[in-house]
């Protein structure tokens, strides 16, 4: 399996090994209108909250339990044999005071596990 190497947004991604699926990403220059990015099945990218668009402002929300919904392929532009696993909810519990906010994310448990 080919494992992509993460880089900064807009950067170039290349497989870390030459074996596997042959999937890779094409590098785009400053004038590129599009680039090809691919990710082998079973692999994923992790984005930290310091990257734009990867965080939530929860300062004005009251304490309580919330759910973050993640939807893959929402416009159905990718062909799939099944779309039954394209939605996932993650529980987030907000607590504390405005000066000392707490955020608890319970362990993820797959449905039917």
Image (cartoon, grey):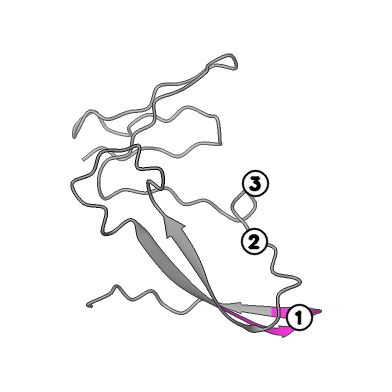
Q: Which mark is residue 56?
A: 2
Q: Is residue 50 above or below residue 14?
A: below
Label pair 2/3, CB-CB below 8 angstroms: no
**Dominant secondary-structure state across the stretch colored magenta:** strand
Judged from the image, the secondary structure of the residue bearing numbered disc 2 is loop
- In the image, the segment drawn in magenta is 93-101
The residue singled out by tag 3 in the image is 52
Tell me where residue 88 sits by quadrant: bottom left
| Disc 1 packing (10 Å; few <14; some 14–19; many ≥20) | few
Residue 100: give its label.
Answer: 1
Residue at horizontal 45%, vertical 59%?
Answer: 70
Compare residues 59 and 8 and report the one nearer the observer. 59
Residue 84: x and y, percent? 26, 59
Query: Which numbered mark, 1 or 3, is in the foreground of this view?
Result: 3
Q: Relative to 64, is 49 above or below?
A: above
Tell me if residue 99 comes above or below residue 1 in the rendering.
below
The Cα–Cα distance between marks 2 and 3, rounded to whole angstroms, is 10 Å
Query: Disc 1 or 3, which lies upstream in sequence?
Result: 3
């Amino acid at each position: 399996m080919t494992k992509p190497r993460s880089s900064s947004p807009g950067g170039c991604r290349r497989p870390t090994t030459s074996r596997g699926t042959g999937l890779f990403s094409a590098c785009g220059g400053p004038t590129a209108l599009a680039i090809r990015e691919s990710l082998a099945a079973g692999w994923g990218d992790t984005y930290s909250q310091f990257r734009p668009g990867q965080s939530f402002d929860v300062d004005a929300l009251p304490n309580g339990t919330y759910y973050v919904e993640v939807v893959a392929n929402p416009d159905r532009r990718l062909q799939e044999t099944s779309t039954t696993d394209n939605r996932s909810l993650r529980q987030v519990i907000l607590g504390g005071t405005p000066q000392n906010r707490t955020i608890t994310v319970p362990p993820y448990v797959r449905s039917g596990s």
